[in-house]
Image (spheres, rainbow, N blue to C red):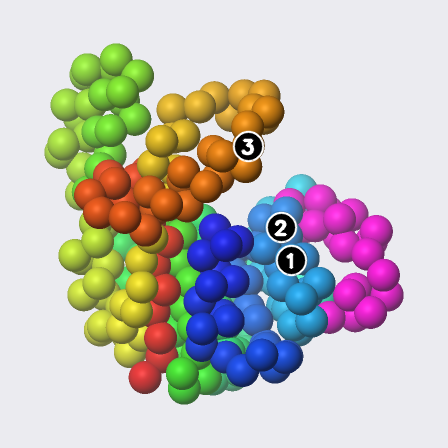
Amino acid sequence: MARQLEEQIVGRFPVGRRLRVLDVGMGRGTQALRLARAGHQVTGVEQDAAMISAAREAFAGEPEGIRERMRIIEGHAGDTGVHFLPGSFDVVLCHGALMDVEEPDALLAGMARMLAPGGLLSLLMRNGDAPAMRAGLSGDWAGALAGFCTTAYGLKRLTSTLAGIGAPLHTWYGVRVFTDTAADDAVVPDDLDALLAVEDRAGRTDPYRGVAALLHLCGVRG
């Protein structure tokens, strides 16, 4: 995700420009902190108190200059219009906050309104075209059969949604192509660099990216 996002930012904005970034569903602040370290002004929105606490703890260990570029607002993903004026940000991230939202169109439209013209919308969503993959690869045949009946958004529907909210799809990647079956507590392998290289290549290569567990979609505000 970090490699993909950096690729899109570098390719869209002038080098050295300090961007206004909104991270909706910030979580522990991993991406927010990375962008603040890169010199950008980052506002995170998060509703989970434990996540906010973890993010604040992570930010506390940073130099003052980086801490000054970070702001956290406690709120829901749908509250962006309450806190900010339309067009207030150059980049809007939502990496996971909409994973379990069945009809995300309205929330996505609210995020798109936060973008200035030419701004980048970066989304991490479940891949509705491949929900049977993890269960099938794990030998859970009943789960795999159920996955074929999902109503989750796939690439085609998400592409239509992004066009409809004024931030047409510019680029998309697959995320967790080969590693989705790894346990949450799996030990980081010694060959992590090779693993990341393979995932990065697969995430931008057909047909592999089409069966990834997650989709990273990048739309651009017209």
The label shown at residue 192 is: 3
In the image, what residue occupies the spot 30% across and 40% down? 212
Q: Amino acid at mark 2?
A: Thr
**Image depth: mark 2 or mark 1 in front:** 1
Residue that numbered label 2 is attached to: 30
Residues at marks 2 and 1 touching, judged by CB atoms closer than 8 Å: yes
- Using the numbered discs, state the Cα–Cα distance from disc 3 to disc 1 in whole angstroms: 19 Å
- Asked which secondary structure carries label 1, the reply is helix
Relative to 58, does residue 149 appear above or below in the rendering?
A: above
Q: Is residue 35 magenta?
A: no
The residue under label 3 is which amino acid type?
A: Leu
Question: Which of the marked residues, 3 or 1, is nearer the chain's N terminus?
Answer: 1
Q: Which residues are magenta?
A: 51-69
- Res. 188 visible in picture: yes
**Amino acid at pointer 1:** Arg
Image side of residue 182 versus residue 63, left or right: left
Q: Residue 161: where, in percent of width, then height?
A: 23, 65
Q: Position of residue 146 (x, y in %)?
A: 17, 26
